[in-house]
Image (tube, helix red, strand yellow):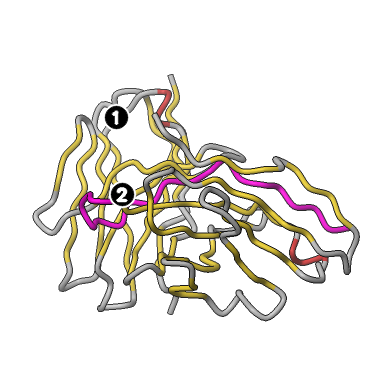
Amino acid sequence: EPEVTQTPSHQVTQMGQEVILRCVPISNHLYFYWYRQILGQKVEFLVSFYNNEISEKSEIFDDQFSVERPDGSNFTLKIRSTKLEDSAMYFCASSHEVGGASYNEQFFGPGTRLTVL
Amino acid sequence: RKEVEQDPGPFNVPEGATVAFNCTYSNSASQSFFWYRQDCRKEPKLLMSVYSSGNEDGRFTAQLNRASQYISLLIRDSKLSDSATYLCAVSNNNDMRFGAGTRLTVKP
């Protein structure tokens, strides 16, 4: 069964450094998403991406965040200058099969745990 | 008011019990509704979508009440493997918001 993959599984960085989190969405999906989950808290929507541009973004997704689909398979989240409070699990998700039903069922990757020191 | 609200639990039930979770949402324009389960330190896994007419998948039944902005999940004949956190999710276009989750522990 196709699945979303994410790398790395764990990233440790120093405050102020830039990080890039990588995702390979399900290959025939059209929409891509990033979420974060701070330890012990709820899953929070960051951004959705369709047709090479941002479709929706939350109030969390400020200027320090950016997303990109650099090639036909990868989808990345860049955090420009990490803060301590960026420490969280970051989940990528994808939805909407090409030619399939338009129902928005999102499938999640295993996450990248980001630790900012 | 929180966008998506759930009873945090925990619910501790014996094997074989029936358990129900509730969820309310604040955005009346919401279009899509889901239940996910999340095991400790793992990703959310889609359990089922929730349709207006209500839907069932084996031991799981989901209901939607748009007028009351309320979603429910019923688990019948609960198994030890059902122990997890159950997340309600509500979407408008491609902006999906999760509840904080309800923790379920099924005991032998």
Residue at image mark 2:
A97
Badges 2 and 1: C-beta atoms under 8 Å apart? Answer: no
Q: Quadrant of the N terminus of chain A?
A: top left
Question: Which residue is located at x 68 percent, y 54 percent?
Answer: A21
Chain containing mark 2: A
Seen from this angle, which residue lies furthest left? B53
Residue B89: x %, y % from top left: 37, 58
Chain containing mark 1: B
Residue A67: x %, y % from top left: 60, 66
| Magenta segment includes A6 | no
Residue at image mark 1:
B17
Taking A60 as reference, is B49 above or below it? above
The secondary structure type at the circle numbered 1 is: loop
Q: Amino acid at mark 1?
A: Ala
Q: Amino acid at mark 2?
A: Glu
Q: Residues within 10 Å of mark 1 (few under 14, many from 20)?
A: some
Seen from this angle, which residue lies furthest top? B108
Question: Which residue is located at x 55 percent, y 68 percent?
Answer: A46
The secondary structure type at the circle numbered 2 is: strand
Taking B74 as reference, is A75 above or below it? below
| Magenta segment includes A110 | yes
Q: Main secondary structure of the magenta part?
A: loop
Residue B41: x %, y % from top left: 62, 40
Q: Quadrant of the C terminus of chain A?
A: bottom right
Q: Along the horizontal axis of the image, is A81 left or right of A44?
A: right
Instruction: Give the magenta range.
Output: A97-117
Camera-nearest residue between B6 and B88? B88
Question: Which residue is located at x 32 percent, y 66 percent?
Answer: B24
